[in-house]
Amino acid sequence: MSSHSTSDGHPGPPRGRRYDRTPLVITWEVTQACALACDHCRADATPDRDPNELTTGEGIDLFEQVADFGDRPPMLVLSGGDPLERPDLFELLEGARDTGLVPSVTPATTPSLDRETLAALADAGVGRVAVSLDGATAERHDAFRGETGTFDTALEAASAASELGLSIQVNTTVTARTAADLPEIADLVEELGAVMWEVFFLIPVGRGAELEQLSPPEAANVAAWLAERSREAPYRIITVEAPFFRRVSNERRRARGEEPATVGTTGAGNGFVFVSATGEVYPSGFMPTSAGNVREESLVSIYRDSPLIQRLRDRTAFDGPCGACPAAETCGGSRSRAFAATGEPTGSDPLCPWVATDHGFDADEIDPDWVGRLA
């Protein structure tokens, strides 16, 4: 299970934290190896590990670099591929703990993710485990994941993790194929006792390039539905690679006569950074343009000083409708999707309904009930 990327609904930097100095989240893809062949996989993961992966010692050095960001280091996510494919995973977790970090882990839902493994993750100091649900039934989820049994494994793993005292996060990928299942998946997230539901709006890279995306108006409808659901859900809902969620959410608030919310503006290179299995530093896992390599330069220096990453923080440098958008400071568009569509990280996000209509989209057209009518 590859980790998702930038998150779009954070309440803003913690007091005293500047995202140009310290990211909110760092994801390290500890390996690209994975036994699954999921339809949407960014990494186009394979069964075999890359012989050039960061070594155990280099991984522990990376943790020290993460700690070098300061007194309040970023949240650290160990992803893949499948982190369980690394035989030194628990040695790495020990190194993270010795550095004062509390990592989250996003394992693939294979038979390796059993109660014994989850207990070992808990004992190793892991703070949160994420499982994926991309369909509300075994048939639909397993078809998306390319392996029979992954739905049941995900549910069993989440239940066992909860019993072991681990915090649970559920990740879901939204495509034209999975949108109809969102209401039932939301109910499952609650039944599992998860603390967070991370909803990823597909970026068409890797195997995901073959999947049918939502149209821009449909994406706005899903964002509005999520905004409404978040008002009553007993868990937190965040979107990934859908920064227009912020604008849609505020439009819904205005329609109710409420003040717009102040939300964070995390994005690729601005609150989020991705370290590949071989040490390359990318603004996000969906923008494979290297800003440097942790084998050659410190992660702190790359994040703070890379010309590529600095360019992504400059909203005045954005092209097309994103550059002219009045919501540029609270949205900014998905830099990863812009890159996938245009080859330019400062291009416009084609999934945003305001971009798709050159700002002619009427917020009154947003229909959160559209999601419920898909079933």
Image (tube, rainbow, N blue to C red):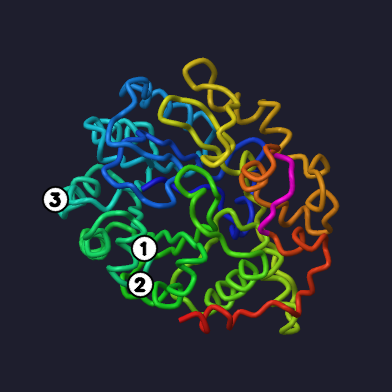
Earlier residue among tags 2 and 3 = 3
Residue 350 magenta-drawn? yes
**Residue at (73, 34) in percent of width and height:** 311
Q: In the figure, 218 relative to 95: above or below? A: below
Looking at the image, which residue sits at the far front?
A: 210
Across and down, in percent, residue 143 comes to 32, 61
Mark 3 vs mark 1, CA separation in Å: 22 Å
Please tell me the numbered disc located at residue 136: 2
Main SS class of the magenta portion in the image = loop
Marks 2,3: beta carbons within 8 A: no
Marks 1,2: beta carbons within 8 A: yes
Kind of residue at disc 1: Leu
Earlier residue among tags 3 and 1 = 3
Crowd rating for badge 1 (residues with CA inside 10 Å; few <14, some 14–19, many 20+)? many
Q: Quadrant of the C terminus?
A: bottom left
Looking at the image, which residue sits at the far top?
A: 296
- For label 3, the residue is 116
Q: Secondary structure at mark 1?
A: loop
- For label 1, the residue is 133
**Residue at (79, 59) in percent of width and height:** 327
Instruction: Report the magenta residues as a range.
Output: 345-351
